[in-house]
Image: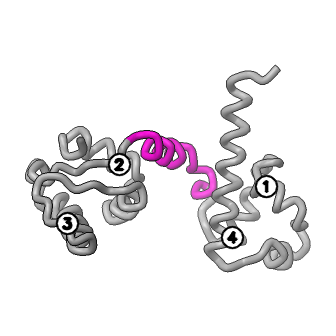
Amino acid sequence: MIHVGEGKSRRYVELVGERLRRMRQDRDMSLQDVCDRSGGSFVVSTLSAYERGKRSLSLERLLELAELYGISPMTLLDVEEEAELHADLSRNRPLRIRLESLERLRPEERRPLENYLEFLRNLRNDPGREVLTIRKDDLAYLSTLYGVRPQVLKDRLEAEGIIE
């Protein structure tokens, strides 16, 4: 019998695996490259199982991989919120930014958002003045400008009534 916690745990292992694969691919490394860099500490089949979520990582192994990829171990573990946000954006309609509501933000908060939205409007040749639709990738990019996680930015913009 599978308990609810086990299902969530399994999904978390899969999400960490997806993050591991992305980190490796972002560095243009093959599974064999990682094994070679680890000095034989890892084997291809084990790395593949981690990336497919078929095998859980020990803390020691997680730390080794984070070091190999030159990232914080927390970067590999911080997947749940991102996954929930992507699921939320996939399930629901895209986020709609109410342009007239941007004035609710302080000028220093508003400027990066206005610049990016203006860029999107020009790119899309969208003359709309009231609402602009953004995708999850746009939100992810904007969150890096603000130095926060996508969900934090989404919550903040919703609280200000900027996102419909």
Q: Amino acid at mark 4?
A: Arg
- Relative to the observer, which residue lies in front, 99 or 74? 99
Residue indicated by mark 3: 126
- Relative to the observer, which residue lies in front, 45 or 96? 96
The mark lying in front, picked from 3 and 2, is 3
Marker disc for residue 94: 2
Label 3 to label 1: alpha-carbon separation? 43 Å
The mark lying in front, picked from 3 and 1, is 3
Q: Amino acid at mark 2?
A: Pro
Residue indicated by mark 4: 24
Image quadrant holding the N terminus, namely top right
User: Which numbered disc flags the more N-terminal residue, 3 or 1?
Assistant: 1
Label 4 to label 2: alpha-carbon separation? 29 Å
Q: Amino acid at mark 3?
A: Asp
The mark lying in front, picked from 4 and 2, is 2
Is the Cβ of the residue at disc 4 closer than 8 Å to that at disc 1? no
Residue indicated by mark 1: 50
Q: Residue at x 65, y 49 (%)?
A: 15
The mark lying in front, picked from 1 and 2, is 2
SS at circle 3:
loop
- Relative to the observer, which residue lies in front, 135 or 108? 135
Q: Residue at x 70, y 47 (%)?
A: 14
Question: What is the crowding at mark 2: few (fewer than 14 residues within 10 Å), some, or many (at least 20)?
Answer: some
Magenta residue span: 74-92
Label 1 to label 2: alpha-carbon separation? 32 Å
The location of residue 61, given as percent across then percent down, is 79, 57
Is the magenta region chiefly helix, strand or loop?
helix
User: Which numbered disc flags the more N-terminal residue, 4 or 1?
Assistant: 4
The location of residue 50, given as percent across then percent down, is 79, 55
SS at circle 4:
helix
Label 4 to label 3: alpha-carbon separation? 37 Å
